[in-house]
Amino acid sequence: MPTHDEFDEPLIAPYFTALRASSSGLNTPPRVEKELLAAFAKQFPKQRWYQRLSVRQWGMAGGLISGAGAMALLVFTLILPAPQHPGHPAMRFDEGGDFIALESRERIELEASPQLVETTVPRTSLASLDGALTPQTAGDTVRVELLVGADGEPLALRLLPQ
């Protein structure tokens, strides 16, 4: 280790020598250091690891964990297939399109013996189902397949090709 004289420049060397000579007689008693360390430990007690983190650091950690969780959920949603829920036997998707429910799913599933009826209905009756209705097509009819309950009420319908 280099000595003090190696760092001294010739112009300021006498000043450093005088400073060393004047401070050589000053010694702090050993109990002062102990008292200072005890006062510091009392004022700033040791903290656990989670207490040392600031609010900002906790916020950043929470954001990273939330982002990782959302990313994992997205990956699992894309990778895992959706569960297949078997519906009512009459609600299979045959050659036509999907059935449009006119009643709740619970009501349709509770039906003991639904029947399929093929018929034609005026296009105006499908206007409430968001069917495209113009003055030119208002008088037309549409082929549909109805799922009818035992009481004669339609439960669902499926549009058939013309």
Image: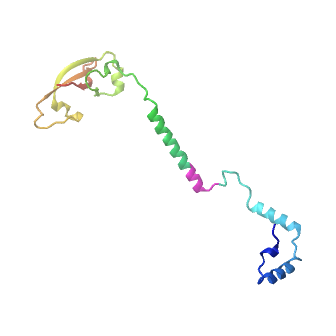
Image location (x, y in percent) of residue 71: 49, 42
Residue 145 horizontal side relative to residue 110, left or right: left
Q: Does residue 80 belong to the magenta stretch?
A: no
Compared with 2, 130 (above or below) is above
Location of residue 85 by image quarter? top left
Image location (x, y in percent) of residue 38: 81, 62
**Residue name at image x 30 percent, y 27 percent:** 103
Q: Quick one: 136 or 63, which is closer to the camera?
A: 63
Q: How is the image coloured?
A: rainbow
Q: How many marks?
A: 0
Compared with 151, 5 (above or below) is below
**Residue name at image x 25 percent, y 25 percent:** 157
Name the main secondary structure of what is drawn in magenta: helix
Residue 68 horizontal side relative to residue 19, left or right: left
For the C terminus, the quadrant is top left
Location of residue 119 by image quarter? top left
Residue 43 horizontal side relative to residue 129, left or right: right
For the N terminus, the quadrant is bottom right
Image location (x, y in percent) of residue 145: 23, 22
Q: Which residues are magenta?
A: 53-61
**Residue name at image x 34 percent, y 18 percent:** 89
**Residue name at image x 77 percent, y 60 percent:** 41
Location of residue 93 by image quarter? top left
Image location (x, y in percent) of residue 40: 77, 63
Compared with 115, 97 (above or below) is below
